[in-house]
Amino acid sequence: MKNSHLRMLKNPSYLQSSLTMLLFFASWGVWWSFFQLWLTSTKNGLGLSGSAVGTIYSANSVVTLILMFVYGALQDRLVLKRTLLIACAVMGTLIGPFFTWVYAPLLTHHFVIGIIVGSVFLSCGFLAASPVFEALVEKFSRQFGFEYGQARAWGSFGYALVALLAGFLFVIDPKLNFWFGSLFGLLLLLNLLFWKPKAERALKADALAGDLAKKSAPSLKEMLSVMKMPQLWAIIAFIMFTWTFYTVFDQQMFPEFYTNLFATPALGQHMYGTLNSVQVFGEALMMGIVPIIMKKIGVRKTLLLGMLVMFVRIGGCGLATNPIAVSLIKMLHALEVPLFSLPMFRYFTLHFDTKLSATLYMVGFQVAAQVGQVILSTPLGMLRDSVGYSVTFRVIAGIVLLAGVYAFFILKKDDQDVNGQPLEVAETN
């Protein structure tokens, strides 16, 4: 294992991909981790209600849903080209000016227009861009011989670093969070433009415009054909009632729920930033460990384990009544995200054609979750306004448990219908 790590550290493609992940998630996380607090806080934000926040998240999800189809199909056609990532990085560079001079004034004075403009900008630069970055790095990992999970771990590490910083910035002035997002976005853009490893340059010159592109790029007919796969629709239903709730719980509800457990909003915001940072550091560590777990117990079992952790974490927050207990339960997030997202990605490359990995990941995982958010964000926000956080969390946990039972029967075993990259191939890389 030590020799394997040393080989990766000498692999320029791994290093460049890791830095790309780190900078993208830093640019996103420094403001996104406090986005819900910014929307709801009366002192440091806009003071919106739970139903209004739910409407914003639903609108973001609608636009993200549409863009994910476009982004996934486009990236599969681009194969290993970075063109789309560069365009997204440009949007990330503009996040500070956008929030300061466009988004906040519109939400305050022209709410509906603000929702529309914000959903387009945030989806283009971040919400729909995130799975594109992940899908392309996964393609790089298979092409240039490194472990995707360990490159993705640097994304979590970057998020953890800025989550700690974000708590302090938010208390001083929330605008600083958005302007730091622009700074990291600029660094990401420079990284994508000027650091192209030798192996990638050689491949572009030799093959991307030739045989490799013809063999690797799926046709439009192949892309559209994914919607005719019964197994994909079974996965979509599964994701809608699991990962959707992870997103709604963590982004739309947990920040305000947690900060309200403390004596003052400022103390709660500081503690949330610190907790979020520690949790994501643990997540980064687990991103490197989960690929090893998958090889030991398999993709399907790892995914089911991730669902169990999700149920315990959300349900536990519905029962806990003090900040220490909630903080400890929140740390399960560090296990949940890698145990769910990495085997889900590997499930697609194991059971489906790898040429369509970006499209399948977008449609089967990210798009399905966005559809769930569109449908459920506003009703769950209204439920929270009506009965409070604890009851809402218990309702969500109960639905996740039922989805876990469903997944036990519909998820294929690792040796069943292997139409993509077998696990044995991954073990030899």
Image (spheres, helix red, strand yellow):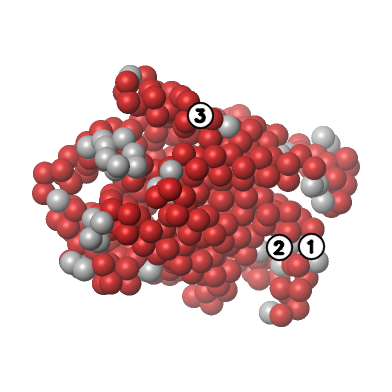
Identified at 39% across, 24% down, the residue is 105
Q: Earlier in the sequence, mark 1 or mark 3?
A: 1
Contact (Cβ within 8 Å) of mark 2 with mark 1: yes
Residue at which label 2 appears = 146
Vertical comparison of 279 with 131: above or below: below
Outermost residue toward the front? 172
* Front disc: 2 or 3: 3
Per the model, the C-alpha gap separating discs 2 and 1 is 8 Å
Give the residue type that dot 3 points to.
Answer: Phe
Vertical comparison of 100 with 14: above or below: above
Give the residue type that dot 2 points to.
Answer: Phe
Q: Which is nearer the eye, 319 or 66?
A: 319
Q: Secondary structure at mark 2?
A: loop
Q: Earlier in the sequence, mark 2 or mark 3?
A: 3
**Residue 155 x/y as whole percent:** 58, 56
Q: Residues within 10 Å of mark 3 (few under 14, many from 20)?
A: some
Q: Which is nearer the eye, 203 or 255?
A: 255
Q: Secondary structure at mark 3?
A: helix
